[in-house]
Amino acid sequence: MTVGDVVEALNGELVCGADQLDRTVNGFAASDLLSDVLAVDQDDFALLTGLTNAQVVRTADITGACCIVIVRNKQPQQPASALAQAMGIPIILCPYSMFEACSRLSHFTESEDDTASRAANPSGTRTDVPDQSARGNDD
């Protein structure tokens, strides 16, 4: 998934960071408590939040978030937009609630995983089950 995919999946509007649309997103975290975000142990994740101030941008930078998604049709404060632009962190505006945004991203990643599985196994046969034809007949 890329930042551009996040924008698409969430019917989002990019506030800044258009040069980062091809950046890889390895997961996502959702919280309005920045102390919880500081505990995230993953790089290049999308941070979903309802916070709109510059502190959320600083937290994204410290934790290695690759973009910020502001949910519930909220607008970022001007200092947050300016700081994100200077730091190269895209801000995406999202019309959905945090729950709905997480659900949409989860479905997007699941469909992306299914597509990759079909490409690797075009016959559609299950590869996680042992081959029963090799088993002896005990009858």
Image: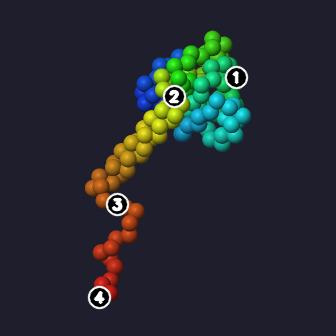
Which residue does the numbered mark 2 point to in the structure image? 97
Q: CA distance from mark 1 to mark 3?
A: 47 Å
Looking at the rendered image, the disc whose residue lies closer to the viewer, 2 or 4, is: 2
Instruction: Judge the density around disc 4: few (<14), some (14-19), many (≥20) Cα neighbours within 10 Å.
Output: few
Q: Are marks 1 and 2 in contact (CB under 8 Å)?
A: no
Q: Secondary structure at mark 3?
A: loop
Q: Are marks 3 and 4 in contact (CB under 8 Å)?
A: no
The residue positioned 64% from the left and 17% from the top of the image is: 80
Q: Position of residue 76 (x, y in %)?
A: 60, 16
Q: Are marks 4 and 1 in contact (CB under 8 Å)?
A: no
Mark 4 or mark 1, earlier in chain: 1
Which residue does the numbered mark 3 point to in the structure image? 126
Q: CA distance from mark 1 to mark 2?
A: 21 Å
Question: Which amino acid type corresponds to the residue marked 2 in the rendered image?
Answer: Ser
The residue positioned 49% from the left and 32% from the top of the image is: 101
Q: Secondary structure at mark 2?
A: loop
Q: Is residue 125 left or right of residue 65?
A: left
Mark 2 or mark 4, earlier in chain: 2
Which residue does the numbered mark 4 point to in the structure image? 139
Question: Which amino acid type corresponds to the residue marked 1 in the rendered image?
Answer: Gln
In the rendered image, is residue 128 in sight?
Answer: yes
Which residue does the numbered mark 1 point to in the structure image? 55
Mark 1 or mark 2, earlier in chain: 1
Q: Is residue 7 left or right of residue 121?
A: right
Residue 4 sits above or below residue 130 on the image: above
Q: CA distance from mark 2 to mark 4?
A: 59 Å
Q: Position of residue 127 (x, y in %)?
A: 37, 61
